[in-house]
Image: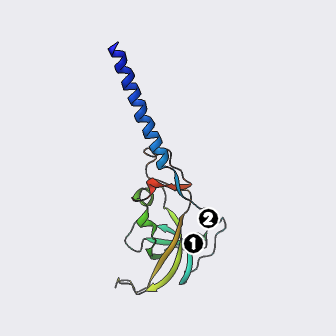
Amino acid sequence: MRNNKLKIIVTFSFLIVITILVVWTIFQEDPVKRAVTLNTSNVNYSKVSTGKVELVVGYTQSTDPRWAVIGVNGSKFDEQGIEPYEYIAVEGNDPANELNEEILLYSEHTPVFILRGQLREEDNPNKLDLKALKVLTVESWDIVEPISRGNKFFRPLSSSKYLSRLDFVK
C-alpha cells in the first residue's frame, strides 16, 4: 500500500515537472521579431554610397568591420564580381549586440540582415589599409529568413521564421 502511494507521488511530481518545462519552453519560443524575406530578383553590384541606406549584410566571424554588404534595398547583389565584399563597421542599434551567439556564430549558414540607417565614411584607423572605412549608424534592422540556430537538439520548437526571447542577450 505504501509502495503504491510512493509511486503515485513520484509519477505526479514527474508530470508536474514535465508540464512546467513544456510551458516554459513554449513561452520562451513565443515570437518576438519576425524574419523577412528578400526580393527574388538580384541587383547589379555597385559600391555603396553614403547617406540614408538600406543594406543587406552578412555577419562575418572576423575582427571589425564584421559586416559584409551583399545587397541593397531588400535584394542581393548578383553573385558575379562581388568578391571581395565591401565591409562596413556598424554602430547604434547593432544586432550583434542584441542577439546571442547561437544565431551569430554557430548557425548552419551565415546570418543575413537588413540594416537601415545613415552611412558615412571615416578615416580608417588601420594604417595598413589606405581605404576609408564606411560606418553605418543603424536605426533599425531585420533578420532574413531562414533563421538558423547552432543546435536544434536543445531548442526543438525554435522556428526559422522568427526570433524568440531565447535568441536575445538578456
- Tell me the residue at 33%/15% (across/down): 3
In contact (CB < 8 Å): disc 2 and disc 1: yes
Rendering coords of residue 79 (x, y %): 58, 69
Where 120 falls versus 145 (above or below)?
below
Question: What amino acid type should be assigned to the residue bearing mark 1?
Answer: Gly
The disc placed on residue 100 is: none
Kind of element beneath mark 1: strand
Q: Which of the marked residues, 2 or 1, is nearer the chain's N terminus?
A: 2
- Tell me the residue at 58%/80% (across/down): 46
The disc placed on residue 71 is: 1
Residue occupying the far left of the picture:
2
Where 26 falls versus 149 (above or below)?
above
Where 1 falls versus 125 (above or below)?
above
Quarter holding the C terminus is bottom left
The disc placed on residue 38 is: 2
Question: What amino acid type should be assigned to the residue bearing mark 2?
Answer: Leu
Rendering coords of residue 147 (x, y %): 52, 56
Quarter of the image for residue 38 reads: bottom right
Left or right: 117, with 128 as reference point: right
Rendering coords of residue 36 (x, y %): 59, 62
Quarter holding the N terminus is top left
Coloring applied to the structure: rainbow
Residue nearest the observer in this picture, 18 or 136: 18
Q: Nearer the viewer, mark 2 or mark 1?
A: 2
* Residue 44 in view in this figure: yes
